[in-house]
Image (cartoon, rainbow, N blue to C red):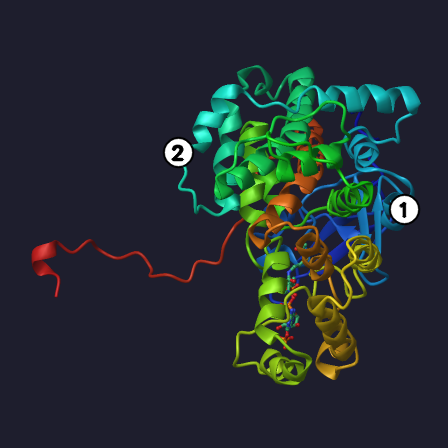
Amino acid sequence: MAKAPSQKGSNETVTLTDNATGKTAEFPLLKGRLGPKVIDIRSLYAQTGYFTYDPGYTATGSTESSITYIDGDKGVLLHRGYSIEELAEKSDYMEVCYLLLKGELPNKQQKEEFEHTITHHTMVHEQLTQFFRGFRRDAHPMAIMCGVVGALSAFYHDSTDISDPQQRMVASYRLVAKMPTIAAMAYKFSVGQPFMYPRNDLKYAANFLHMMFGVPCEDYEVNPVLAKAMDRIFILHADHEQNASTSTVRLAGSTGANPFACIAAGIASLWGPAHGGANEAVLAMLGEIGDRKNIKGYLARVKDRKDPTMLMGFGHRVYKNYDPRAKVLQKSCHAVLKELKIKNEPLLDLAMELENIALSDNYFVERKLFPNVDFYSGIILKAMGVPTSMFTVLFALARTVGWIAQWNELIEDTEQKIGRPRQIYTGKGRRKYVPISKRR
Ligand code: ACO
């Protein structure tokens, strides 16, 4: 995981003038390999006594990164320079994991070694199974994921020294390898079935399907079309640069917290309905709409600024065009439904009708609101028999490699400091303490 040389140096500067005082301050202009120029404001406070206000970080770059690039206006997503469409079509999840973690696609031998290593880390410490039993059966699997993944740091002490590159790599392998096992265990626990051990003869996605849907009393034959579709879903969710959960992982990591704790923080952040929880919310929304005839009324509520209803699976902070992952998933969705001989899936029909209407409606066109990755993923997962409460868990499983690649990059980045934003204070000014006997 050698750090790529920085691309961001530039001789250009930007001068800011304070209109109140006439004083000027000069700031370097940085430029990545792709994307717009960036003003380096690190010396802003020292030079001017001001800092910036940017809730939601809509205009703030928090790091340089060589992992993923998004051009939201054009709907482009590249991992280490390779387009998501090409990776989804020609690659597989293990190869994408290697690419994200190590920077290059593996050759044949490197791929075999990597898959062997991941496969041989899929079992979890047996005592971890006891840990599961402390949860209520009706716990949301994401609640279980937050707890169990955080608890990994209590089981794997030999990979929590973040200053040791070897330990960091072992922690990375462990997280990628164990997430499907833990995710399937969270599901099995919720339905009261025995946990299934991983099988080393199966590929990553097929192994997950086996642990999720198999039972010890009979053989479970993995459907290769479904395994391929699941592998593709994993690829499409593998990384997405500095989104909320990745930024959470980086923020936690910036304090020196161990990788298992950082990934647990990422899982918690992903859970929200504005982020990874949206795929679950899309199905709830489609269920609520229920019928084509209700679409118009639902969209009227979405467009009513006084009504908090959102069109779930639509809109994105960065994409102001079709999310390229949603396009790939729309195709996969049809393949899965065909394989499962599901004709006229009402939810898919409803989703496509909703998409058609929304894409030609001025409210969505003007705001550049397009379907995002969550719009179709829920429908595929539902068709595969994955319960709704597991949708975000699968997102977390697939995103773990992105989180851990970004965490490794953070640790190796000598420019990174503890993440600590400032604020505009709007509370009371300094005042005298009043003893309780004198308070009214
Ligand atoms: N339905 C209706 N209106 C929307 C939607 C939506 N899904 N998304 C954005 N808007 C509106 C906003 O209300 C705002 O309108 P206004 O200008 O009249 O005030 C305008 O479009 C701009 O939206 P913002 O909220 O400023 O966009 P932001 O970048 O802050 O939010 C977000 C992006 C959180 C993804 C938002 O679009 C959303 O909540 N979408 C629904 C949830 C969802 O699908 N999340 C998954 C995102 S993808 C992922 O995390 C994997």
The residue depicted at 58 percent of the width and 65 percent of the height is 284
Q: Is mark 1 within 8 Å of ligand 1?
A: no
Residue 203 shown left or right of residue 191 in the figure: right
Q: State the CA–CA distance, disc 2 to disc 1.
A: 42 Å
Which SS class for mark 2?
loop
Q: In the current view of this chain or complex, which residue is farthest to the left?
A: 437
Report the disc number at residue 89.
Answer: 1
Q: Residues within 10 Å of mark 2 (few under 14, many from 20)?
A: few
Instruction: Quadrant for residue 167, please give it.
Output: top right
Q: Quadrant of the C terminus?
A: bottom left
The residue depicted at 48 percent of the width and 44 percent of the height is 143
The residue depicted at 79 percent of the width and 37 percent of the height is 93
Tell me, yes or no, if residue 21 can be seen here.
no
Instruction: Look at mark 2 in the image and give the residue it sits on.
Output: 134
The residue depicted at 9 percent of the width and 60 percent of the height is 438
Tell me, yes or no, if residue 102 can be seen here.
yes
Instruction: Quadrant for residue 124, please give it.
Output: top right
Q: Are marks 2 and 1 in contact (CB under 8 Å)?
A: no
Disc nearest the viewer among 2 and 1: 2
Instruction: Quadrant for residue 321, please give it.
Output: bottom right
Residue 56 spot, x, y in % from top left = 60, 58
Q: Quadrant of the N terminus?
A: top right
Q: Residues within 10 Å of mark 1 (few under 14, many from 20)?
A: few
Residue 393 spot, x, y in % from top left = 60, 45
Q: Amino acid at mark 2?
A: Gly
Which SS class for mark 1?
helix
Q: Image height check: is 120 above or below 324?
A: above
Q: In the current view of this chain or complex, which residue is farthest to the front?
A: 218
Q: Amino acid at mark 1?
A: Glu
Mark 2 or mark 1: name the one nearer the start of the chain: 1
Residue 4 spot, x, y in % from top left = 83, 31
Q: Quadrant of ligand 1?
A: bottom right
